[in-house]
Amino acid sequence: MAYSYITSATTTQVGSACKKVVVVVNTALTGTITVIDGIAGTTANVATITNPGVGAMFTYFDLNSGVRIVTSAICDITVLTTDQSR
């Protein structure tokens, strides 16, 4: 299992193909978190999370190309991934 801690408006490549992705919102944020199945660009959206509250947790399965997270505002989130091989 790998993780990334994200605190700014940015694009973060969290990992390659993975079995499970969990996005944990540590502090409520105004803005969006976009979950993308890919390693480049922003077109293969899996989900767009809007204005999530503190403690919210979102789980996605079987991202085949990679895990890319795009945040639109200052945030405090943790993204956990599990490799496809496990």
Image (cartoon, rainbow, N blue to C red):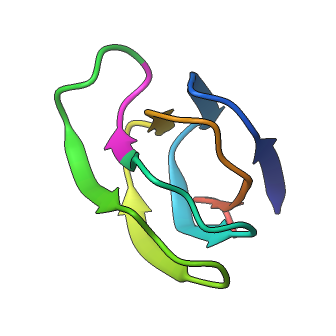
Instruction: Report the magenta stretch's main SS.
Output: strand
Q: Which residue is painted at 67% across and 84% down in the image? A: 55
Please state the extent of the stretch shown in magenta in the rendering: 35-39
Q: Is residue 13 above or below residue 71?
A: above
Counting from the top left corner in percent of width and height, residue 65 is at 38, 37
The residue sitting at the left extreme is: 43
The stretch drawn in magenta includes residue 4: no
Looking at the rendering, in which quadrant would you find the N terminus?
bottom right
Q: Which residue is painted at 64% across and 78% down in the image? A: 54
Q: Quadrant of residue 41?
A: top left
Q: Which residue is painted at 81% across and 46% down in the image? A: 5
Observer-nearest of 18 and 4:
4
Counting from the top left corner in percent of width and height, residue 4 is at 79, 45
Counting from the top left corner in percent of width and height, residue 84 is at 58, 59
Observer-nearest of 36 and 9:
9
Counting from the top left corner in percent of width and height, residue 43 is at 17, 27
The stretch drawn in magenta includes residue 36: yes
Looking at the rendering, in which quadrant would you find the C terminus?
bottom right
